[in-house]
Image (cartoon, rainbow, N blue to C red):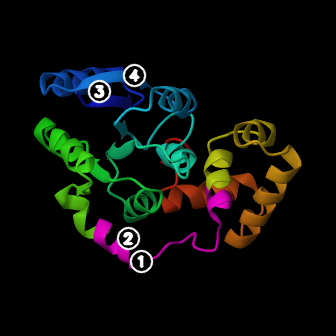
């Protein structure tokens, strides 16, 4: 039986997904509304598939993808989000998402996406399929190409409002090292304070404008 984990900050969305998925014979083994709790759960439960929203209150769902990358888990991730921004599709693909489905999709498509990724295939909603192909081939221009993977990760955490100490605890780095990364990434992006970094993050779709 397929074991699923749901990460979405809206309880009603998780309840709806659970009903659809369990009616299809799958089992939801856990759920959460924030990245920190979800990461601990996923490492403990090792579900077959995670359904992942990107717009979360504590951090971007992209951070969860980044945290899972390289851990060798068999877990597959399907992004389920409202965002069809090219950068989001490209970044999710780069970080290892096997599927990307928009929240306007039917329950049938969500189930199909789960089945596809379990069979080792990818699944992208029609509206984002072309962008996924472009992302895989490197055709989508990455406005943050100058940043390393760690700098991208720390940027997302900084603009989410996390302190250097909190980021350091999460990533097992010293606050001084986090500050070094922060200064370096801001220099690469040509910004000199947090307010301008947040503006850049909103413009690039790293965070939504209502979060900034």
Which one is closest to the eye, mark 2 or mark 3? 2
Q: Which residue is mark 1?
A: 138
Marks 1 and 2: in contact by CB < 8 Å? yes
Instruction: Magenta stretch: give its range.
Output: 132-152
Q: Residue 180, position in %: x, y?
A: 83, 58
In percent of width and height, residue 28 lies at: 30, 23
Q: CA distance from mark 1 to mark 3?
A: 33 Å
Q: Is residue 172 visible?
A: yes
Callout 1: helix, strand or loop?
Answer: loop
Question: Image quadrant for the N terminus?
Answer: top left
Mark 4 or 2: the one toward you: 4
Residue 60, x across and y down, in percent: 51, 44
| Residue situated furthest right in the rendering | 176
Mark 2 closeness class: few <14, some 14–19, many ≥20 residues within 10 Å: many
Checking the image for residue 135, the label placed there is: 2
Q: Secondary structure at mark 4?
A: strand
Q: Which residue is mark 4?
A: 30
């Amino acid at each position: 039986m397929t074991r699923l984990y749901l990460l979405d900050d809206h309880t009603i969305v998780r309840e709806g997904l659970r009903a659809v998925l369990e009616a299809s014979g799958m089992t939801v083994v856990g759920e959460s509304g924030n990245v920190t709790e979800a990461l601990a759960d996923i490492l403990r439960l090792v579900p077959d598939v995670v359904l992942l929203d990107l717009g979360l209150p504590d951090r971007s769902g992209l951070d969860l993808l980044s945290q899972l990358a390289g851990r060798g888990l068999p877990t597959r991730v399907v992004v389920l989000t409202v965002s069809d921004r090219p950068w989001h599709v490209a970044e999710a693909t780069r970080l290892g998402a096997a599927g990307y489905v928009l929240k306007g999709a039917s329950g049938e498509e969500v189930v199909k996406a789960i089945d596809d990724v379990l069979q080792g295939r990818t699944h992208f909603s029609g509206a984002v399929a072309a962008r996924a192909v472009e992302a895989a081939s490197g055709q989508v221009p990455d406005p943050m190409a100058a940043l390393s993977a760690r700098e991208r990760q720390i940027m997302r955490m900084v603009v989410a409002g996390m302190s250097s100490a909190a980021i350091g605890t999460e990533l097992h780095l010293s606050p001084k090292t986090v500050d070094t990364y922060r200064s370096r990434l801001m220099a690469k992006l040509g910004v000199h304070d947090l307010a301008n970094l947040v503006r850049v993050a909103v413009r690039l779709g790293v965070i939504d404008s209502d979060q900034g």
